[in-house]
Amino acid sequence: MSAITREEIEKQIKELYYESGNLVGLMRDIDSDLRREDSEYYNKHIYSMRGRLKSADSIFLKLKRKEKEDILDLPDLLGLRAYCLYDEDVILAHKKIIQYLFNKNKLFLPLEINIYSSWGPERIQEFLRIIKSNIPKELQPGPGRADTSESKNTLEIIAYNHNNTRKQLKINVTGKASGYKSIHYLFSPTTREKLNSVLCELQLRTIIQDVWAEIEHNISYKKANIHPHVKKLFNNLSNFLENAENQISTIREIQSKDHLLHDLSKTTPIYLYLHYDDRIKVEHHFEQQGLLDEYINYKNTINSENVKNKSREAIANAESMLSSLKQRMSQNITLDYFFDMELAYISILRNKRQDALNIYKKHLHSADQLMRYAIYFRKGEIEYLNERYEDSFDSFDKCERIIESIKNEAHPINLFNVYQRLANIYWSLGEEYIDIALKKQHIAFDIFKRHNDLFDNNDVAKSSLYNNLCWYHLVKCNKYYDSFDHKTESKDAFTENLQQAEFFYNLIINLPFKQQNTTHTAAWFCYTKFLSVEKLNSDYFSQPSEESVISEKKKWLEDAIEWCKETLENKDNYGLIPVKSRELQMDHIQTILQEAKTFEQSGY
């Protein structure tokens, strides 16, 4: 018989949870501290958290089972779990949790850490090293007053709470036969009088480890006479999930390396210099003060290939010229805007994005409509580079809305560059954004057609424009290719996009200057035509002869191979992510050459 009744338990937990103890508030505080972005303990490796307060029924049963009479004897009245997506994140999250529990303000008194795992000895030692190295000096034992003892499975460290009372932190490293894998931190709050004796538990594990633990808990926990075969199967499942986590880690490692290339490419993407629209009349101000030549020299410098290639010397020279101009000019609102925009652009080139962002934010509310579209565009670019995509999209939308209202006043080359860049950015985010990218690219093409005379000597702009439009339509072709045979709408969409791609392919082949990524696009277009010959000529009533089909396929495959050769010889790569672009090119070239070999072996 229990000495404490369920009614008494309910009364105690009401006081502890909601009234004077406010354990609910403590749970919210811990969750918020460990997840809040501006917290010193914030750790992006903690994917999510969950908390619960033990119910009266659960307390009653546990006291009965443990033959205890005081709810404060239970180690997990407050239970929290922190989840990691990846196994390798556990050690980083562990470090942040240790720093939080051993906070210099002595918010908590850590009592026990249990490491249940099949991690190897090196990983275990790293867990222990983190614990010892993150205990603040004021909590560490003083000379001659404490001793540290270590054994194979248990490490004991003497620490002190805020009242200088000696406490023992016990660290247990054990492996459970069932395969359970987690870290449990047992602690007491020290800043809330009513909670000093309450024991709280925080568990750290990966989401996959939690799936196993939840299923095992549901089937086995508090159950008698678990079948030996079930125990063995749980152990096997634990090993299986460990292998799955290893594969996930491998996938993440590959993706991380890929992301590093993407990040590297992101250090130099904003090289398009935006012109000042005619109504602002920047040149007029410099001419009035006799500094037009100096201004033109600066413009030539900031637009030079050396600056675009991020030559430190060239950027420093441009910054020095800008500073000299500013010192010699009488200031007004227009020139304040000019000098700040130039300084922001130079900050971007120097990879000082936050400095540039601060300048743009400063002018958002003071600049007029004609100036603001460029500010929102630049702001969106920086937010994209910082991977704040929601903010980036919002800035780009505002930029486009302003352009719609002042399009006849905005500089056409600026508008072309803005929409060309928007298409590139949306495309870089994945194929699910292909429709948006294609729409932006066609807007750029319409601007190009209306102001063709402004692009007469800009072969790079033409090459990029035709290449992107051809490539995006090829991507759309690929989207419909697999369902081509059994869906009429897929065949129609495929045919329409292939015709559009062919239109821009014909513009590409007539260009005097062709980039590496443009010749690659041409090769892939020819290969797509090769693949589609039979499908597009499969109409029962107008089916061509086998000989003509083979002849057409051979022609497109030969053209594809010629473009592959030109791609390998071409060194001019203006892709958004040149390293990734080259990687894709090589993959496509290998695919085309292998297809050619198979075609030849078939006797064609």
Image (cartoon, rainbow, N blue to C red):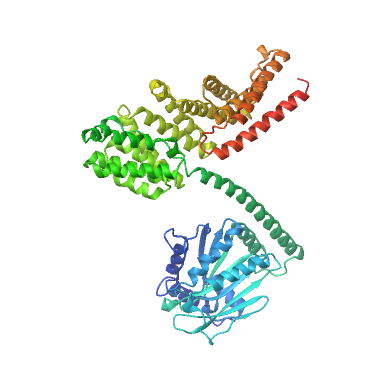
Q: Nearer the viewer, residue 57 or 276?
A: 276
Q: Nearer the viewer, residue 280 or 382?
A: 280
Which percent across, then down, holds residue 595? 71, 28
Vertical placement of 344 versus 458: above or below?
below
Residue 215 in view? yes
Residue 389 in view? no
Residue 79 appears left or right of 321:
right
Vertical placement of 155 versus 183: above or below?
below
Residue 298 appears left or right of 142:
left
Residue in the picture at 26% in, 38% down: 368
To which quarter of the image does residue 601 belong? Answer: top right
Give the tally of numbered discs.
0
Which percent across, then down, holds residue 603? 78, 21
Residue 257 appears left or right of 137:
right
Q: Could you tell me which quadrant the C terminus lies in?
A: top right
Which residue extends farthest bottom?
144
Q: Could you tell me which quadrant the N terminus lies in?
A: bottom right
Residue 325 appears left or right of 356:
left
Residue in the picture at 39% in, 20% down: 453
Which percent across, then down, holds residue 467? 52, 27
Which percent across, then down, holds residue 173? 64, 72
Q: Nearer the viewer, residue 513 or 385?
A: 513
To which quarter of the image does residue 190 belong? Answer: bottom left
